[in-house]
Image: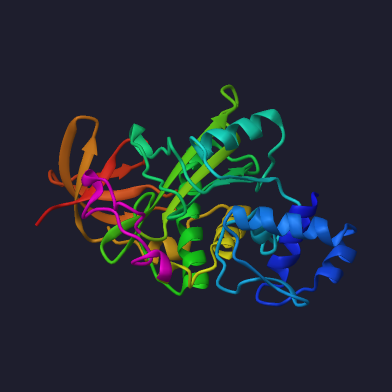
Amino acid sequence: MTVKSHLLELLEQHKGEILSGEALASELQCTRAAVWKAVKSLREEGYAIEAGPNKGYMLRKDSNRLSQEGIRLYLRKQEVYMKLYKEAGSTNQLAKQAAVSGEAGHGAFVIAQKQTKGRGRRGRSFFSPEDAGLYLSIVLKPKEETVQKSLLLTTAAAAAVYKAVKKVCGISLDIKWVNDLYYEGKKVCGILTEAVTDFEGGNIEFAVVGIGLNLYEGEGGYPRELQGIAGSLYPDAKSASAADRNYLAAEIVNTLIEETEDLKLSREYVEHNIVLGKQIRIIDGKKCREARALDICEDGKLKVLEEDGTIQYLSFGEVSVQFKEE
């Protein structure tokens, strides 16, 4: 661990407290000049570190910048592989590469402050402006899970985000089958699950769950095609600082790992789902039809009543569900 990284770890652990330069130099086994150099570098990266003559250094209590050191403080499995990028194309792609190479095992994750090629379902892009959201991808290696049960990985991820946001931010989200979360009628989170499978056995070798969560509307607002559709947890950056994003990122990872230890449909996923009992529009390829959502089955499939009176069971690989416009 470098002096700068170790220093940031100490400042994160004692956020809001003044640590003397002498004590830091002793702990870091370096000179006070080296401490100052590391502080200067961290400030240039955007960390709010205050200093005063003969007082020492303090990471301000309201500092809310993502850091590996800050996230790791809250992880239940602190030794897990984690990589933070200032900018990434797609965190899902980076996580898959790390898993294939053997670097990233179960529970490992990649997180970025910005994505330039963020992806959603069905080839769509996911708008990922710098610092305005959490963009992370988690590697999961389920115990002998088959492709048929992969839908439950997505429902588990939605439940994990719901629980983490509720715990850290005090905000209760709505879940829309299968992979979206809403707040005040607008989409604030999308989930993309990609599995690498054993073709012959049909088992999942590993899966990557990508999560994009909008914290606030970034500078310049949402693109025209997302206006009125996309939303965020907070109205602006200032109000978003009330939630510790390092804690929130770690809690999403912690909760998802917990949810997948015994993979099954979460009670929260069903109770907070907003499609049940609603008339919905089903987009299947280029075809569109209407149905009524009746229930979410134990395997995560959506049970619907078609207009002709038949019952169908939908999986996320087949359709996209939208609310019927009244």
Q: Is residue 213 magenta?
A: no
Residue visible at 54% across and 67% down in the picture = 244
Q: Can you name the residue that lies furthest to the left here?
A: 326
Residue 182 falls in image quadrant = bottom left
Percent of width and height locating residue 219:
34, 54
Q: Quadrant of the C terminus?
A: bottom left
Residue visible at 22% across and 52% down in the picture = 227
Colouring used for the render:
rainbow
Percent of width and height locating residue 156:
50, 54
From the viewer's perspective, tell me whether residue 61 is left or right of residue 155.
Answer: right
Dominant SS of magenta comes to loop
Tell me, yes or no, if residue 267 can be seen here: no
Q: Is residue 96 above or below residue 65?
A: above
From the viewer's perspective, tell me whether residue 154 is left or right of residue 22.
Answer: left
114 or 260, nearer to the observer = 114
Q: Is residue 157 above or below residue 267?
A: above
Residue visible at 12% across and 43% down in the picture = 308
4 or 69, nearer to the observer = 4
Q: Is residue 169 above or below residue 3?
A: below
Residue visible at 47% across and 49% down in the picture = 211
From the viewer's perspective, tell me whether residue 39 is left or right of residue 188.
Answer: right
Percent of width and height locating residue 235:
33, 67
From the viewer's perspective, tell me whether residue 271 is left or right of residue 13.
Answer: left
Tell me, yes or no, if residue 224 can be seen here: yes
Count of numbered circles on the image: 0
Percent of width and height locating residue 47:
60, 60
Q: Which residues are magenta?
A: 217-238
311 or 189, nearer to the observer = 189
